[in-house]
Amino acid sequence: MIWQILGTICYIILAPILGGLLQGIDRKLTARLQGRQGPPLLQPFYDLYKLFSKEVVVVNDVQNFLVGGFLLFVVFSGALFFFGGDLLLVFFSLTLAGIFFTMSSCSANSPYSSMGAQRELMQMMAYEPMVLLVAIGFYVATGTFNVKEIVLHNGMPAIVYLPGIFIGFLYILTIKFRKSPFDLSTSHHAHQEMVQGLTTELSGSVLGLVELSHWYENIFLLGVVGLFLYKASWWSAIAAIVVCAISYFLEIIIDNVFPRVKWQSMLKSAWMVTLVAGVVNLMIIAVI
Amino acid sequence: MKVSKSPWLMHYDGSSCNGCDIEVLACLTPVYDVERFGVMNTGNPKHADIFLITGGINAQNAPVVKQLYSQMPNPKVVVAVGVCACNGGIFKECYNILGGVDTVLPVDIYVPGCAARPEAIIDGVVRAVALLDEKKKALSQEQVSSKEA
Ligand code: SF4
């Protein structure tokens, strides 16, 4: 119990720091891949500080409330995950967080942010099936949805049973991290065909909250990647961290290599991967 | 920490000949890489701190420029890049040109040149960034004094 509470507290305190550093490394590596020097490592923190000290142009109060809901439910999902709670509940509350965020940009009544919201819904449609399959995969492999019991379950790490589901999850992680080719609804690159999509109408500290939520979300998602390997022993913890680092590096490379695609190709390919890698994997372990 | 550590920049092309715009984009390339200073190019006035304008103001883009400026949250800085943006430049006598950017907006930094060289543009942006801090300070002092009053 102590460890569970400790995990939650560590997540709530450390996730923004780690998430910001991760983004700093991301921007540095991206710049290096493009042959540039890149911003300082702490740049994301400077950005966040700047956003919080700027004037806020409030479009409507509902929007601020919804952004608050987004942050709250992202933190809740992550905290529950690191507490060792129910994986299904974790994923459902993550979806709810996503819905809050989409609603916030719908509420702004601006064509660009509504377009962003529509695309975000499309993205959710693309990744949700795979997210559910991850939860089901863990259940079939270990007989429980409970994160703590998954970790304590004696047997091989889940990745041995669920290699297909792991690959499928990595695929949709590109969508969740908002990386090119799937950064349709909003992007950290200077794509401008619909201004900034989801975040067009947000400014100042409200935008800062969105940024913060993304850091929380990224760390939580890497936690799910780690769950495929973590088995409550020190060597598996190291393996989990190494695999997380490799997956994130892979995402950065994909981000830099591929141009953005249309939503049709995203939806098709994401569902194809879900079907081929995820469902087939599930069928095989169900039979065995 | 200072506001100036993370200046986000919005670039608007008035009635420029595109010479200055190419130089602005050159600043983002590996040779000059303004992201070293944390500068990010954004197309969204609500996220921008620096408003960088190339080319003069004509009857059609005057309301657009005003609109963009009014959508930017405080503190904000306007940088006019190239002689066209400074005072109308080579197009000054044209029937549709009102003049430089300062005919419609309070310009903070003038970057001369036709076309303005990337070094000059970066210099202008760095000066704009310093100004951003001053404006922030003035803004918070204003808030304090308005609270006291
Ligand atoms: S200053 Fe020269 S290069 Fe720049 S927009 Fe004007 S004419 Fe073109």
Image (spheres, grey):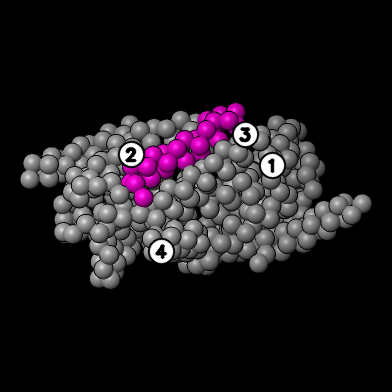
- Provide the residue designation for mark 2: A127
Q: Which residue is mark 4?
A: A2
Indicate which disc, 4 or 1, sits on the residue closer to the N terminus.
4
Residues A154 and A92: in front is A154
What stretch of residues is rendered in magenta?
A: A85-114
| Circle 4: residue type | Ile
Label located before the other in sequence (2 or 1): 1
Which residue is tagged 1? A57
The kind of residue tagged 1 is Val
Q: B135 or A175: which is nearer to us?
A: A175
Q: Mark 3 vs mark 2: which is more N-terminal?
A: 3
The percent position of residue A146, horizontal first and vertical second, equals: 30, 49
Name the secondary structure under disc 1: loop
Of badges 3 and 2, the one in the foreground is 3
**Residue drawn at (44%, 53%), measured in percent from left and top?**
A79
Q: Which residue is mark 3?
A: A62
Dot 3: what SS?
helix
